[in-house]
Amino acid sequence: MSPQSTGTAGVKVSLPVSTHKPAPYNGPARDEVLALRREYLTPGLLTFYKEPLLVVEGHMQYLWDEKGKQYLDGFAGIVTVSVGHCHPQVVKKVTEQLGRLQHTTTIYLHPTIGQYGRKMAEHMPAGSKLSSNYFTNSGSEANEIAILMSREFTGNADVISLRNGYHGGTQAAMALTAHGTWKFKTSPSVGVKNAMPGYCYRCPYDLEYPNCEMKCAHDIENVIRYQTPGEVACFIGEPIQGVGGAVTPPPEYFGIVYDIVRKYGGLCIADEVQTGFGRTGTKFWGFENWGVTPDIVTMAKGIGNGIPLGNCITRPEIAATMKNRIHFNTYGGNPISVTQGLATLEVIDAENIQQNAHKVGTHLKDRLSALQDKHALIGEVRGMGLMLGVELVRDRKSKEPANTETADVLEKCKERGLLIGKGGLYGNVLRIKPPMCLTTADADFMADCLDEVFGLVG
Ligand SMILES: Cc1ncc(COP(=O)(O)O)c(C=O)c1O
């Protein structure tokens, strides 16, 4: 793989060139695609970039537009492509299944769903008894099931989620999402209370870790005592907040929170939609980094390397509550999505994807951290493995969010062949979450590209 210049004036960095040759694109032009979308799709769909990007092919960590320009995918379809776009092993298995049987629903038996359920349970921490899977089509749905089971199991109604968190776009999942930009006025937010995340860079109490005595984590006890009847159904939290901007809590945060929630009768749910499947590098599940064992784990995105698939896994006695009424999901666990999920999990294990996320992610984080000495725009570099965030500020003291600069960085990276995401409460955090097959050469390109772009924007 030899580096190749983008050919754009003033651009010095060069993207490693993939050996994959994209097929010639014969479809409609970008303007036509955009016009179709504007006329026939909901205006609620958002696009990145002043000139929205048309993507027509993908292979491993790379994407191609309609003109054959190659990009390094630093955002993986929002943290979804875990082992690489169209990974050959995954494509092979799912193509075979597509030609044999696509759908029946779970009212009949099919071998793959049970085999996949077993493999998933084998990936849970030993002794956790997390073995009963409810496969869904999305992360939002998995979170809905988790809340439903918690309420049914505990007999309590109140749910606690974290400020700056994101748990999905269905009405109940949106109600959990304590992030104004994402939240419509949905009435099912009844019973949802929000506690403080471990967001040290913008500590709501203006305290400094470790002298803060973890006030943010202890806040949950006040929420339960003063805003609920003193008992809760559950707490839900992302081990590292994704949409919220790779917010990584102090190591003891979740231990304190889980103890308090359990004291008041609640279950603890880890939303692993972004952090799961080895992405944090050091551990397979994000929660394992914090030394806690949840009662329920929800997952989606990276679970299926791009297919609509989610899962809610729990202990058998909690799962048993789903027998209290008839509950049904037409596509949950269908042969196609579980075949893709199983093939993805096999690749994660066989290709040491978690270990790669650790190695390449650590290298990338070190390189990005080193850029802090050079570019005042960088307020903080945080995250673990290949779940990284770079918070941009106009002034390091006031921490004024550099949101327009962040959008500008994204545009300039795109020109150079790098796609990354943005997020955070103020839209000022660069989100770097590529397919986990990323190489060190790709990581170096990312860091060089950001170095060049920060020099132009900061
Ligand atoms: C942490 C987290 N939970 C849940 C969801 C919702 O998943 P989905 O979009 O598949 O419904 C997302 C989506 O971004 C997420 O990041």
Image (spheres, rainbow, N blue to C red):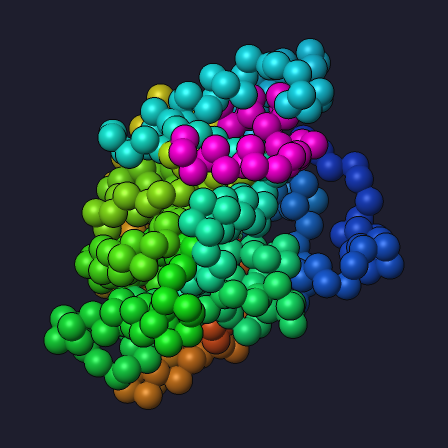
At x 73%, y 37%, the residue is 25
Q: Is residue 432 visible?
A: no
Left or right, residue 413 beside residue 369: right
Q: Is residue 153 visible?
A: yes
The answer to which image quadrant residue 2 occupies is top left
Q: Position of residue 447 (x, y in %)?
A: 35, 56
Which region is colored magenta? 316-342
Q: Is residue 267 magenta?
A: no
Q: Position of residue 344 (x, y in %)?
A: 47, 27
At x 29%, y 54%, the residue is 262
The answer to which image quadrant residue 22 occupies is top right
The image shows a total of numbered marks equal to 0
Left or right, residue 56 beside residue 438: right
Nearest to the observer: residue 237 or residue 48: 237
Nearest to the observer: residue 83 or residue 213: 213
The single residue placed furthest to the right in the displayed view is: 39
At x 61%, y 37%, the residue is 325
Nearest to the observer: residue 446 or residue 388: 388
Quadrant location, the N terminus: top left
Quadrant location, the C terminus: bottom left
Say above or below: 294 vs 20.
below
Q: Position of residue 215 (x, y in %)?
A: 23, 74
Q: Position of residue 339 (x, y in %)?
A: 56, 21
The answer to which image quadrant residue 118 occupies is top left
Nearest to the observer: residue 154 or residue 254: 154
Say above or below: 388 vs 435.
below
Q: Is residue 322 magenta?
A: yes
At x 47%, y 22%, the residue is 116
The single residue placed furthest to the left in the displayed view is: 211
